[in-house]
Amino acid sequence: MKQTTEAIVLGLKKHSDKMSLLQVYTKAEGRLALQVYGAHGKHKIKAAYQPLSIVELTYSVNPSKPFATVDTIDPVFLPEQVYADIRRQSIALFVTEMLMLTLTHPQQDEPIYEFLDDFVHELNDDPEPENLHISFMMQLAELLGIGSPAEELTVNLSPLTLSRKTRQEILRQLCDYYLTHVDSFRLPKSLDILIEVFN
């Protein structure tokens, strides 16, 4: 059985010489892991597998296999500014890891998908992306139904420009909030990279 859906790429990991596992958040079914053959060798569509690329996927479901198989992948929106900017790259890696730690089950959720679609475009277009991961974590918490972390922050969010120290303190408190409210959450491995880039 074949399915077609729009999806946001979360990550691609080589599983064997020929097969890779593609993690995506789809419009139709939420979080999915799909097997892809030859993905690392297809240079023409390499960008489609980059974190936060928005693509259209056609995949085949075989009940006897643990993962569906990608048949075609076509770019819908490739956030090229994200690929070219270390600040945006570090946010993209952090955000995709956040999503893999919090969106752990296949479950359609159109508001979350639309939120992620909007965020990808904002991350690509905003000339000053330094605080986007902070607003992302706050909005995602509300969409996940775990409350509003802004109410528990001890840091003032009102200044238009946050200092490096303030940004790091907010980030630490937000991570603590997720650790408290989401059972599957752990500190993202990309957190240290994100802090270093914005130091």
Image: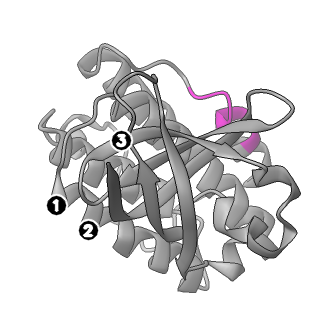
- Going from N to C along the chain, the mark reached first, 2 or 3, is 3
For the residue carrying disc 2, how many other residues have a C-alpha within 10 Å: few (<14), some (14-19), or many (20+)?
Answer: few
- The answer to if 192 sits in the magenta stretch is yes
Q: Which residue is drawn at 24% across and 42% down?
A: 141
**Residue 163 horizontal/vertical position (percent):** 59, 58
Instruction: Give the residue at mark 3.
Output: 31
> How far apart are the two marked residues, 2 and 3, measured between alpha carbons?
14 Å
Q: Dot 1: few (<14), some (14–19), or many (≥20) neighbours within 10 Å?
A: few
Q: Does the magenta stretch include residue 86?
A: no
* Residue 114 - label: 2
Residue range (magenta): 188-193
Nearer-N-terminus badge (1/3): 3
Q: Position of residue 187 (x, y in %)?
A: 54, 22
Q: Which of 43 and 64 is in front in this view?
A: 64
Q: What amino acid type should be assigned to the residue bearing mark 2?
A: Glu
In the image, which disc is placed on residue 55?
none
Vertical order, 118 against 115 (above or below): below
Q: Quadrant of residue 193?
A: top right
* Category of crowding for the residue at label 3, using alpha-carbon neighbours closer than 10 angstroms: few (below 14), some (14–19), many (at least 20): many
Q: Is residue 173 above or below residue 95?
A: above
Q: Nearer the viewer, residue 130 or 55?
A: 55
Image mark count: 3
Residue tagged by mark 1?
Answer: 111
Callout 2 secondary element: helix
